[in-house]
């Protein structure tokens, strides 16, 4: 079975300031499992960072991206089973989890939270990685 790759891109375009040349994508669907790339405060169409200096806006954008990618993968937020949250400051935790919680109300995924020194770009304050399992009726 071939995997479905959603929104492929090359890191040369996403990180022009870094000497990278990797072929990646925003999501992969394999055997009914959706693996999402960690989402940050970035517009997926323009690659522009949003909410610079505002962790709540960045979290909203990350969750909006996750919802959009889940739709493109043939699923919904209700299919999410695991999230990993990376924040660059422990003081962001409450804002991030409160904002993320609005998007995942009644979903009950497992969650891991990490505080890291930095993310791929210095303006990014939060990154949310999600894994989902499509319900049987939505699997190809």
Image: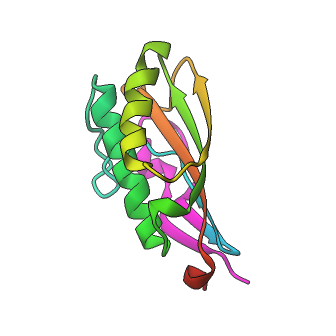
Front-most of 23 and 26?
26
According to the image, what is the colour scheme of the structure?
A: rainbow
Magenta highlight on residue 6? yes
Residue 38 x, y percent position in the rendering: 53, 45
Task: Note whether 115 is above or below 64 in the view shown.
Answer: above
Examine the rendering and report whether any part of residue 70 can be seen.
yes
Q: Which residues are magenta?
A: 1-28
Residue under the image location 59 percent in, 29 percent down: 113
Task: Note whether 80 is above or below 73 in the view shown.
Answer: above
Residue 109 x, y percent position in the rendering: 59, 48
Residue 98 occupies quadrant: top left
Q: Quadrant of the C terminus?
A: bottom right
Residue under the image location 46 percent in, 59 percent down: 77
Magenta highlight on residue 102? no
Please indicate whether residue 53 sits to the left or right of residue 136 in the image. left
Task: Note whether 56 is above or below 37 in the view shown.
Answer: above
Residue under the image location 54 percent in, 51 percent down: 37
Q: Quadrant of the N terminus?
A: bottom right
- Identify the residue at the far right of this view: 1
Residue under the image location 38 percent in, 48 percent down: 103
Please indicate whether residue 3 sits to the left or right of residue 102 in the image. right
Residue 31 x, y percent position in the rendering: 70, 75
Residue 14 x, y percent position in the rendering: 42, 47
Residue 117 occupies quadrant: top right
């Amino acid at each position: 079975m071939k995997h479905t790759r959603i929104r492929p891109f090359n890191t040369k375009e996403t990180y022009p300031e870094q000497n990278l040349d990797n072929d990646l994508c925003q999501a992969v669907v394999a055997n009914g499992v959706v693996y999402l790339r960690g989402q940050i405060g970035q517009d997926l169409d323009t690659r522009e960072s949003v909410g610079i200096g505002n962790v709540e806006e960045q979290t909203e954008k990350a969750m909006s991206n996750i919802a959009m990618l889940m739709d493109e993968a043939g699923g919904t937020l209700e299919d999410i089973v695991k999230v990993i949250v990376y924040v660059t400051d422990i003081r962001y935790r409450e804002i991030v989890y409160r904002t993320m919680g609005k998007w995942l109300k009644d979903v009950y995924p497992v969650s891991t939270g990490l505080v890291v020194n930095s993310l791929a770009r210095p303006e990014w304050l939060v990154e949310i990685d999600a894994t989902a399992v499509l319900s049987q009726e939505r699997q190809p």
